[in-house]
Amino acid sequence: MAHDRDALWASGYDETVEVNQRALIDKVLARYSGEFTVFRELLQNSDDAQSSAVEIYFETEEYLRRKNNKDAMQPEDGVGFPDLKATPVSQWTFRNNGIVFRDEDWNRLRKIAEGNPDEEKIGAFGVGFYSLFSVTEEPFVISGGHGMQFYWKEKTGDQLLVRRGDLPSKDALQPNPWTTFEMTLREQGPVPQPFDLTRFLASSITFMVHIRSVSVFIDCHRLAHLTKSPGVPRELELPKVLKKSSGSGLMSVKSVQSAATRIQAHVMHAVYALGTEKPLILTVEEPPKVSQGGFFSSLLSTFTSHHQPVLAKPLPKPQVHRDPTGVYTSSVTLTMFNADVDVKLDKKLQSELHRSTKKNPPNHLNYSLIYTGKDEYDVSLDEEKSQPISSGSVFQGLRADLNGAGQAHVFIGHATGQTTGIGGHMASRFIPTVERESIDLVDRNVAIWNRELLYIGGYLCRAAYEMELENIRMLWNEASDSTNTNGFHPDPQLRDWLRDRFLHVLKFFTFHVSTPSSDVARFLEAAFFGCSTLPLKVLSTTGVRDASDVRAPDPMFSSFLKNLPVLPAPILLSASLAIRTLQSKGLITNITFSDVLAQLRQHPLNEDELVACLKWLVGQQDPTHDATRARTELLNATILSLGSGKDAKPIPLSMVQYFIHQRMIPLDGPLPDSLMPLSVTKHFTQEQLRSFGWREFLILDWIQHIFRPDVMNADPAQDVTRSLEWAERVLTVLARTWPSLSKESHEKIKAMFIQKSCIPTSSGLYKPQLAYFPSANIFNDLPVVTFTSGGALKGNMEKLLSFIGVRKHVDLQVVFDRMVKTGDWTISDLITHLVTIQSMLTPDEITKLQMTSAFSKEGESALPEKKSRYRASDLYEPSVTNRQLGLPIIDWGEKTKWRSNSEEAKLLHRLGLRKSPPLDLTVKLCVSSEPDIRSAAFKYLIDSIPSRYPDYRCEKFGHVAFIPAVDNFGPCMGTPDEVFASHQWKVLGFSVAEDAFRDIAVSKLGLKEHPPATRIVALLEKTSPQDQNVARRWFEILAGHVAGFSSSQLLIISGLPIVPTQVEPGSQALRWLSPSQCYLGGASKGQFHSKLFVFVDFGPSANSFLSACGSKQEPSVEEVASILVADPQKFYDLAGGYENYLVELRNLAVNARLLSTGALARMKVSPILLSFRRQRKSRKESNKAPDIDEDDWELLYELRKPLDVVIADDTNAYQMFGESIYTAPQEDLVENFYAILGSKRLSAVVKEDYRITSEMKHNKSAADTRALLLERLPLFLHEHTHTRTNVSLSWLSNQDNFKVRVFGKLTVVKSLSFGDNTLKREQDASAVAKRSGHGPIELWLSGSTQVDMYEVATSLCRLLFETVKVNDALLFMTILSTDLKALKRRGYNVDKILRQQNDRKLVEAARGSFTSIPVPDPRMSQSLKSETRSLSPSHRTKVPGGWGTSPPKAVASKPVFPPAPAPPLITAPPVPPPKPSTPSAPPQHTVSNEDVGRHPVIPNIVNNTLQNIRRKIPGFNSSSEDSLTLSQGSQNPRIPPTVTPQSNIRSNVAMAIRGCRPEEGKLVHNRREMQTIKESLDEGYCDISGHVAELDHIGVMGTMKIFIARDVPEPRTFVTRKHDSLARFIHIVTPLANIYSLPMTALHIFYDLEGGLIAFNRNGSLFLNYRFFEAWHDQDVKNGNINQAYISWYFTLAHEIAHNLVQPHNSEHEFYFSALCEAHIEKFTQLLSQ
């Protein structure tokens, strides 16, 4: 690239860059959008040329013609004033009298974008002149005798040329001082808006430095003449608090001057007539909003919204015809503030500004601000009203813009489009944008310059504002001093004038939004408020103050905060925007609580002001503040000035405590200083007064005040102890209010009166307790109450005097001294006197009587001096019962008969005389040593409960032996805890109540019917039954009270030796064992177990008690295992040999899950497993035939350790090595149990190898055999269900995956390595199958012998399945060796199975991969069906027992699975293929839905049902024979067919039932076990892969626990809502459980919302789905039809019980399902027939 550039400079040539000058000028002019742009630019140039006068001519074509003929200045006769709207103008002429053009000026004029480099000049960009091209094509400039004509090359070209030269006027003697710009218009038109032009010119010359006069002509007629007369500038003293420079220091104010400038305008009426009406723009001020909240939150809302300007339309003036040439003269006076500014820029900023403006920035500049004062503004408005036409004044743009109408602009020599946002124009050396319409705040460096200038502008505004405010302050203070108004308020008229003047300046300096750039007003406002270190000053109601000291007005405070400086309300209403701004800046705030406090502390309030203040305080309801604390502070700060002048008495509200409400208190008496005057409190309610923390001045307060020593000593006339009249007045006032006073007040008043001698009596002032009422007339020398006013002592006065202690009767002690001790009165006489005065006795006197020993006892000495005296409470009334009980009786005498209801008796009872003995005394008398008293007391006690002794509780007297009882030794006395009501407990040695009162012992005395469990346990710990008969009686009694024992107590009893048993059978010697060591049922029940364990039988009732205490019905699996491990051989001997021992092993196998880990560990190392080894019979017998038959072997049984026993899972290997190894019994259940204990399988210890000769390729038998296998495999796999296949049928169908090869000879070599045995056997074979890893399966055939299908089946089964059974090979062999027609006859649905298999192949081929086949609901397949194999799917969705109702679709679509694996099959029955049916076989009856409804004979239905079920199970004939035989086509040369004994089947069935157990957990968490399920003909077995969600235990009904799924709503009320239906379900299930001998605790009910799970077996716990019962049977059962429900749930239970033996749903499960049904069918038939 560098090489190319060098070559270009070496060989190239230069060309100029061409500019389309017309397009460039048009683009420049496009940016000049303002009106009168031409005149604006020419005016600015004129001012730069120091012109003092400017003339503008609009010349018509006719005028130009005459002008060229030199007669233009002489108007033609008859030519009138032209129509300014219609007269076309052909040329504009602009001229000024400034400095004529110099050569540099002429040169710069023809250059675009080369501005004036003089920094004192405004022009900057060099494009202003070219604005002339907006109206003309060829402008002509004349100056100093020279001229320059602009023209376009070829008229329509784009190149601008100039022609310059001297003019003839150059040589004139008097040179022309005018510089003229002639603009021949591109198109003629009228004068451009004459009125607006005049208004524009009036505004433009305002800031012009040199121009003083501007005239506008049309032809020779002067339309307008404007003159400016600047005044003499006055130096202003700058406030020291103002910062003269911004933080950057680029510009600094040196001085500020002010001068008055007058502009006068002479304007023709014709111009006014063409004026466009521009009415004033007024602002609709938003009035301030007073906060609706409490005072402490806010008093005024914050002003945030902007005002909305609207046009104020003045009324139109009537039109008056005027002479258009008439001239109207107007003027305006402006105040011009000029700031002298020094500029100090760094070099970088100077260079950047020079680059932008093409001139150096000035070092010194002026900043001007036009301010129109209030008076000048008003004069201008008045003058405008007198102008001829209502088009507004030509000075309207110069007057103050107080309403934010946007009429104040920024001037850069002349007005720009940028508004200032305040009320006046500003002018300075701002750098504008190119079109000069706004200030440039975009360019980074130019923006710095302009922002600095805006700071100076804000400073100048603040200086002008402060000076005006200082003038207002001085006028206010002078006027205030002259009017002697305490320095606050001047004359109202002057005050209003000063307020309006402040409003004017405030509105003038209100910052509105500026346009087009809002930043201008924002920067000005920031400088205005930020240039001072002191707050802004404003005019308040008290004069000029800092804004921070002035508050927004609030009428709530005006009545009592009269000295607080606030904004005058008119200012708040008229200048809301300014006030909002001040409030937003925090300068003016609302009246705060602190303001109120400060004012109240400084200025005491008179009564009216205090009332207003308190009313305001009452009105404050602000829950967000601590109003109580605030009110306390305010009351503490307030001082009431009571009175006036020198008599004024200050009362701080902090010391006020009371207010008067009751007018009864004498106001002329002594009152406390802390009482608020009534003149204030009468304006408020009591609640309001209490809110101030004051309380009412009550009578009690008044009494306490006048009883104070200082108050009493102050005036004897108002001392209750010295003035009878004042004491009587006080008592009178107190008596009037006495009923309304509280008891507490009564007591306090009484306490004060008792201490003072203040009761007026006949003997003077006495204390109340020494004064008497006139009614006390026993003695004549008593001081009796007497009032000087003669007032009666009755009503409230009597109550008052009586309460404070004035006596109505003589003291009792006096009576005792004068009467009783003389012996003149008896007890009855004394009581009679007391009865007459008892209404006057005080409580203290009654108490004294109660405590005085003034009464004698019956039966003592008659002499008064020898009689003992007792209190009334020590004696009893004289009744017969009290005398029988030997109680002390009052000596009433014989003179007066005793009557219990007399007034005397009532008074004695009041004094404490007892009517009857208390409860504890009565009980004490029951154990008296005197029999008569003891008997009478016990009878009295019985009769008095509960009438006299309702609070009797036997627990209170548990230590007192007052109960007559009987025990084994005879009558006795016992405590309530020792005696029991039930007589049966006497047998166990407990004390029982006597027969006479046994019936009421429990109800009245609270005796317990039975001893508590703790007592019984304690008894059994100490004592055991003597013999078995006693034990039976004890246990029978305790059986009825088992529920009263806790589990811990039963656990204790289970270990106590309380069960007597015989040491030896038939022996009389006894030994005592604990219940946990015994088993119930007698020795005969246990049979074999009775030889190992102790069985007892005390009868059903007694046995139930022992069962609760830990005795079991039979030994647990753990216990049997322990006995077995302890001595296996003894266990074997006691069992009686092989069969019974094997039964025990089966039992252990079934319940292996119940064995502990420790038990299993001991069993693994003990010789407990029964095993057998084959050995040949005697040689003579064995040599009879070359092939040893099964009968030539005998079995040797031996007990061995699990590791020494082999599980014979390989029949062929067993035939070879059977005589060398001990193997397990060939039962699946037993074999699995052996495997758990560690026994190895034979297939695991035998290794198999093959020897072959040469392969016979292309042998037809290989292809035939492969085809046969693939054809018959579907039939076989369809029947095989107990384990899954390793490979799929589709996989085998692939040629590469399954190969058949033929060899000359095959030899199988099997090696056994087990224990010490290492054996090897060889055998010729006709077929073997092998597979290496996951490779293909190869079937090798021997070509030299006939292929044995059994060997084919055996070898393939080992590869096809994970576990192989003997029956698998037999079944597969049968299917392979039997033709299809024979298989059909035997019941195989050959066509359908093969068709289904073919369909699967097609589907798999379409999908490209193997997928599982959906199966129907297996549980549904167990319903009754037609015997034929062509039922529709809808008939296959039945459930067991659901004969008449089709299940819901959801049930049919989901299989039902057992929740957890059950133990495997115990004894596997032989499963031969079905016998072929014969034509003579009787036809089977088909049971359909209609049959159930029509056939009334229930047993027939059940029998037919069972037949259908049996026919579905392989191994059952279609006939009713019990024997199971092999089919004719089966060949099994090694193991002959055998029939499982019925005893074994019955044993397994019983074992399955015993395997059911209750569910102990509260949460059933079901696990999933997915199994691959194959169809069986047209019906599928029940799929066990179903699962249910987690179930929660929610309750129990009877003995059955209820579980529900977690998504069931409202689980807590489920049992309540479904109670009746659940009860019907339990009613159905209970008899069925009894048929199967199932414990009810093993059955559980569950409920879910969806799914097909009808029931499941979880580790022996059976769960039945209530949802299916409710849907299918509940309504029928409710209507009385219960048989169908019985049938359905009978088979469901059998199905689930069978899972205790066999986990999967296969032929073995169905075998035991059928066996269970058969075993209990008779009982079930009886149930149905009931």
Image (spheres, grey):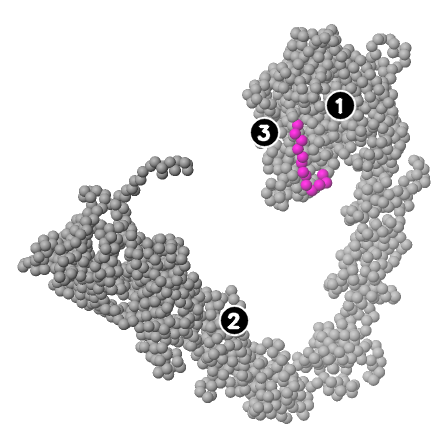
Q: Earlier in the sequence, mark 3 or mark 1?
A: 3
* Mark number displayed over residue 630: 2
Rendered view: 134 above or below 212: above
Q: Residues within 10 Å of mark 2 (few under 14, many from 20)?
A: some
Q: Name the residue under label 3.
A: 1453
* Residue in view at x 54 percent, y 83 percent: 673
* Residue in view at x 44 percent, y 69 percent: 533
Question: Would you say 902 lies left or right of 455 here?
Answer: right
* Residue in view at x 27 percent, y 70 percent: 260
Q: How crowded is mark 3: few (under 14 residues within 10 Å), some or many (20 or more)?
A: some
Question: Would you say 1215 lies left or right of 66 here?
Answer: right
Q: Is 1568 inside the magenta-drawn segment?
A: yes
Please identify the quadrant where the N terminus is shown: top left
* Residue in view at x 27 percent, y 52 percent: 127
| Residue nearest the viewer, comparing 216 with 1509 | 216
- The image quadrant of residue 1206 is top right
Using the numbered discs, state the Cα–Cα distance from disc 3 to disc 1 in whole angstroms: 32 Å
Residue 1153 place in picture, x, y as percent:
76, 34
* Mark number displayed over residue 360: none
Q: Name the residue under label 1.
A: 1468
Element on which disc 3 rests: loop
Rendered view: 1347 above or below 332: above
Using the numbered discs, state the Cα–Cα distance from disc 2 to disc 3 in whole angstroms: 78 Å
* Residue type marked 1: Ala
Using the numbered discs, state the Cα–Cα distance from disc 2 to disc 1 in whole angstroms: 97 Å
| Residue nearest the viewer, comparing 615 with 982 | 615
Please identify the quadrant where the C terminus is shown: top right
User: What stretch of residues is rendered in magenta?
Assistant: 1559-1571
Q: Earlier in the sequence, mark 2 or mark 3?
A: 2
* Residue type marked 2: Ala
